[in-house]
Image (spheres, rainbow, N blue to C red):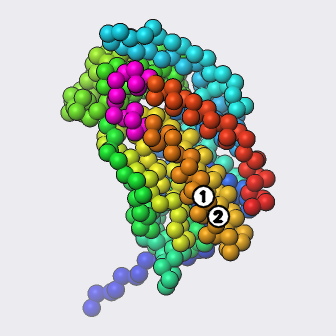
Amino acid sequence: MLPTAAAPAVVRSDHDVIVVGSRAAGAATAMLLARAGHDVLLLDRAQLPSDTTSTHSLVRGGVVQLSRWGLLGDVLDSGAPPVRSVLFQQHGEGADAPLRLPVKDKAGVDMMLAPRRYVLDAILADAAVRAGATLMTGTTVTDVVRRADGRVAGVLAHEAGTARRLELTARLVIGADGVRSRTADLVRAHVLESYAPSGTCLYTYVGGVPWDGFEFHLGHQAFAGVFPTHHGEAAVWLIRPTSQLAPVLTAGADRSEALLAALQECAPDLGERVRAGQVTAPVRGSVALPNHVRQATGPGWALVGDAGYHRDPISGHGLTDAFRDAELLAEAADRMLRDPADEAVAMTAYGQQRNDAIRDTFRITRELAEFPHPRRFAELQRDLSKALDVEARQLAARPDPAVALSVC
């Protein structure tokens, strides 16, 4: 008789909170809860640091959050250039003259940022670990643990390169694993609102050009731009309805050249400057991402960041959304962990606060993504700018997170 193979070892541990996904939303939530004294386990299937598809943009509200959390200096020290001006330029017949505006000192900050994600995510994860969270990378969640009454009470997972099975329990499981969130599927989070999927957003990195601030270029059914980032490079991007970018998507090995040709067609001035520089990376991006709002919480679980809410990248607001909602969720989770009797009130409040916060920007983003007439598009951009300034002031006026979490 052949010998029976030994069953894989099962490793069990118990925590206050398990956060699935250690990038912007997850690491920020873990950091805040660990700073409040909770036992937090932070999981990610990737081996970090690693890059991820991103709009890169941290508008004023996101910079406010980094400043409030004491991490703005770390991001600047990493080499992310402070952005202090914004260029708006229309292209085509009847276009207005280009307009460059300074980034004013509002809500306590006078800059915007566009860090590379492998840098930003590492800073946030390191801050979570310094606060006391445990980080496990290369760890894939395969299912959730449920009590007899249906409440989520943990996750099952496995570690890359080992036969070990993990049974990890917690009072709260937080899904922060992105727009295609497996956690959201496992906890059966309902989709509360759903709209037509996004168009296509493609970008690459370009060096050798003296980039000076954010740039936004508007053409017919086209929105392009520049976000200066690390290493003297910029993320140069183009967003169009998917049918308009088919020549780029089907270009295969010639995709970089096809993207440059599309840029030159939609925004000739920008296209010429890109051609004068050096493209330093393959074309990346997204096609037909969902525009939806998921249920934010349920018995024993919550969602944050793109796992709970995702909108077209045309507004470049995803990272700021993630930072705002991380703090809202951390406050609610801290309250429920300290007094289980407050769970229903605290978690319901988080869901309502998140829904209230996204209402205006979600509506504006959906209309922008339909590529209305350029003049209407410009009006919507102004509306978005006003909404983001209001949000930044509200974030700056919030209590210090350390104080708020300690008294919840």
Left or right: 379 in relation to 348: left
Task: Pick whichever, 194 or 258, lies toward us.
Answer: 194
Residue assigned mark 2: 346
Above or below, 120 relative to 81: below
Left or right: 70 in relation to 260: right
Task: Pick whichever, 263 or 129, lies toward us.
Answer: 263
Task: Pick whichever, 2 or 217, lies toward us.
Answer: 217
Q: Disc 2 versus disc 1: distance between alpha carbons?
A: 6 Å
Disc 1 residue type? Tyr
Above or below, 313 relative to 221: below
Start-end of magenta stretch = 365-378
**Magenta stretch, main secondary structure class:** helix
- Please report the residue visible at 39 percent of the width from the left and 35 percent of the height from the top: 367
Residue assigned mark 1: 350
Above or below, 344 relative to 139: below
Task: Pick whichever, 84 or 106, lies toward us.
Answer: 106
Q: Secondary structure at mark 1?
A: helix
Q: Position of residue 405 (x, y in %)?
A: 74, 57
